[in-house]
Amino acid sequence: DLERGLRLAQDTGLKVYLSLGRYGNLFAGPALMPSWYTFHHPDTRVMDRHGRYHDVSCFNHESFRSWLFNEIEQYLRKFPINGILIDEPRGPDVTCFCSVCRALCPDVTDLQRFRMRSMVDFLGELCSCVKRVDPHAKTAIALLPQDLGQVDELAALPHLDTVGGHLFWQLLHEDVSVVEKWGRSIVEGARQYGKRSQLWLQNFNLVGGEEQALESAFKQIVGLEPDEVAGYYYWRNNEDPWCVWQTTRRLLRSIPRRQLFWHKMVSSS
């Protein structure tokens, strides 16, 4: 069962983070997994300027917010969970013209900026919900490269602990050298507000020798000295999963011991 599995993970020394997945289709998750809530509450869907509905619940609907925050509370109370991961939040990609957004922002010309502001407010309220239920639970967010312009606003949220990013250069058809630029904006933004930084290595969806680029991406990430380095399960869409796994293991072992514990060393001095 789920609770037993989570406790086994904690017993081995792992931290358990809950990703909200496809809740409201607002967060990242399996592409073919629809949102139960959005399906049963079509009135909460985002509506674009042309009157077309999208299969995403608008976070400004109070009914959706209440349901989501209650779900988070139940998970935190019932299961051994160390924190919540807000994975690739969606929002700014479509400006919502639903009745709720129009009522909250009558000025149509300001709707796009309002959407950005209200998304940050929503994520801040989500983090506050987590801390109300369990003050010791950690909150983390992972952004896509195209959303890194939000780092400063999000890092300023008082109840957000970690700011992270998915540095998936290959998926976005970028040269691997862009990893350093993306990662630096996250690390510097997080440090400015006293938050932890988390950089994600793309160790999935690699084909035809792209495994060699893992080392370049990893060195760029480690060189920025983030607080955390993250990655995915190695068998996900890799042409040679075993090669990717062995490369990932070797790279993780190469992290200098000083860097593994550098925050502990700083805090004890």
Image (cartoon, grey):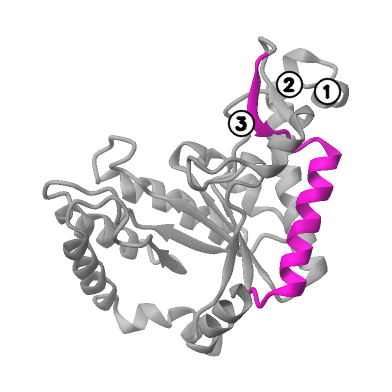
Q: Is residue 249 above or below residue 236?
A: below
Q: Secondary structure at mark 1?
A: loop
Q: In the displayed structure, does residue 29 sit left or right of residue 115?
A: left
Residue 240 shows up from this direction: yes
* Total numbered badges shown on the rendered structure: 3
Residue at the top extreme, as displayed? 50
Residue 63 on the magenta segment: yes
Q: Residue at x 55, y 78 (%)?
A: 5
Which numbered disc flags the more N-terminal residue, 3 or 1? 3
Q: Secondary structure at mark 3?
A: loop
Q: Is residue 21 above or below residue 9?
A: above
Which range of residues does the magenta coloring cover? 52-81
Residue 36 on the magenta segment: no
Quickly name the residue at label 2.
111
Q: Residue at x 53, y 39 (%)?
A: 149
Q: Where in the figure is residue 133, as x and y percent of width and height?
A: 80, 69
Quickly name the residue at label 3.
92
